[in-house]
Structures are given as structure tokens and as C-alpha cells.
Amino acid sequence: MNRVRRSMGVGGLVATVALAGCFGLDDDLTQWMAQQRAQANPRIEPVRPPTAFQPESYQVDAELSPFSDDKLVRALRSDSSNPALSSLLLAEQRRAREPLEDVPLDAMAMVGSIQKGAQRVALVRANGLIHQVRVGSYLGQNLGRVTAISEHQITLREIVQDAAGEWVERTTTLQLLEGTGK
């Protein structure tokens, strides 16, 4: 106990001496600080005035909701330039949807493939389950139909809208996910 009191007393003495050295201000330092303050010439740029807000009127009656099924119907009716694509979209609307069409392609992973007779079957992981996918199956949210399956990828034909709002076909692949160990 005596040792602890002694070490506390010595520590307190050292702290007191160190703090006492901080209170004596050096005249050179004070002069230098005054000189630096006098030389400092801050550049303050004036603040630009705010721009006035110009409200735009919203015309909801004239436009069709982008989430409406009517948009697809209107596109099918107006797309007379490519009747083959229009009939394809109509056929896609009439068929029953498959479970993997509710899952985005980026949430799926091809984890393997197997050969069943002459037909290759891809194994796809979606929502934590493994699904068997064959040529002709549908995947993804863009009316993606499987056109080919190889050992390393699934090739899909999707129907999407381009920037101009036209319905176009595009080819997409789902690559084999290797080395996951999951």
C-alpha cells in the first residue's frame, strides 16, 4: 500500500512539473503567431444566390403507367412493322408462367449440368433450391426461353424493350458458377 502511495505521489509530481512548463508562453512564438495572422489573407468567395424553383405540371391522364399490362397490349397493337415479334409476344402472354420466371437472372446461378439420354439438363440454383432446366424452359423476368445448354452455360432468348420502346429479342447467357463449394 505504501508503494502505491509513493508511485502516485511521484506520478503527480511529474505531471505537475510538466504542466508548469506549459504555462510559460514564449515571446517568439507569440510574435510569430501575430505575424502569421497579419499576413494571412483569406479568400472568401461570395455565395451564389439560389436558383428559383420552376414547378412542372404533371399530366398523368395523358401518359400510361410503365407498370401497367396495358402498355404491353398497346405495344403489341402498334407494332405492325414486325408481325412475327407481335405474335411471339401474344403467345408469351397466353402461356402459363413457370416458377423461375419470377426470379431475376442475376439471382440465379448455373451450378452444373447432367446428361439424360440425348438431352442435356442444366442445374440452376435459385432461392436456395436446385432446379432442373431443359431447352424450352423459361428463366428470368424478361420472357427468357432456354435455347441451348452446354456444359458451361445456358443460352436464353429474351424479349425486352429497347431505349426507343420497341420490343426486341436479345440473346443472354447464364454462365456456370465454378468453385463455390456451397
Image (tube, rainbow, N blue to C red):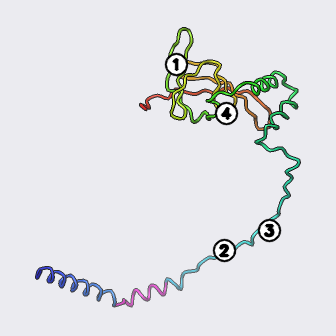
For residue 98, the mark is: none
Horizontally, is 173 left or right of 89 in the view? left
Horizontally, is 23 left or right of 174 in the view? left
Q: Residues within 10 Å of mark 2 (few under 14, many from 20)?
A: few
Q: Secondary structure at mark 4?
A: loop
In this rendering, the label closer to the viewer, 2 or 3: 3
Residue flagged by tag 3: what amino acid is it? Ala
Which residue is nearer to you in this view: 128 or 63?
A: 128
Instruction: Give the labeled residue for mark 2.
Output: 45
Instruction: Give the labeled residue for mark 4.
Output: 141
Instruction: Give the labeled residue for mark 3.
Output: 52
State which tag comes first along the sequence, 2 or 4.
Answer: 2
- Image point (66%, 74%), residue name: 45
Residue sticking out furthest to the top: 118
Which residue is nearer to you in this view: 110 or 101?
A: 101
Q: Which residues are magenta?
A: 24-35
Residue flagged by tag 1: what amino acid is it? Glu
Residue 140 place in picture, x, y as percent: 64, 31
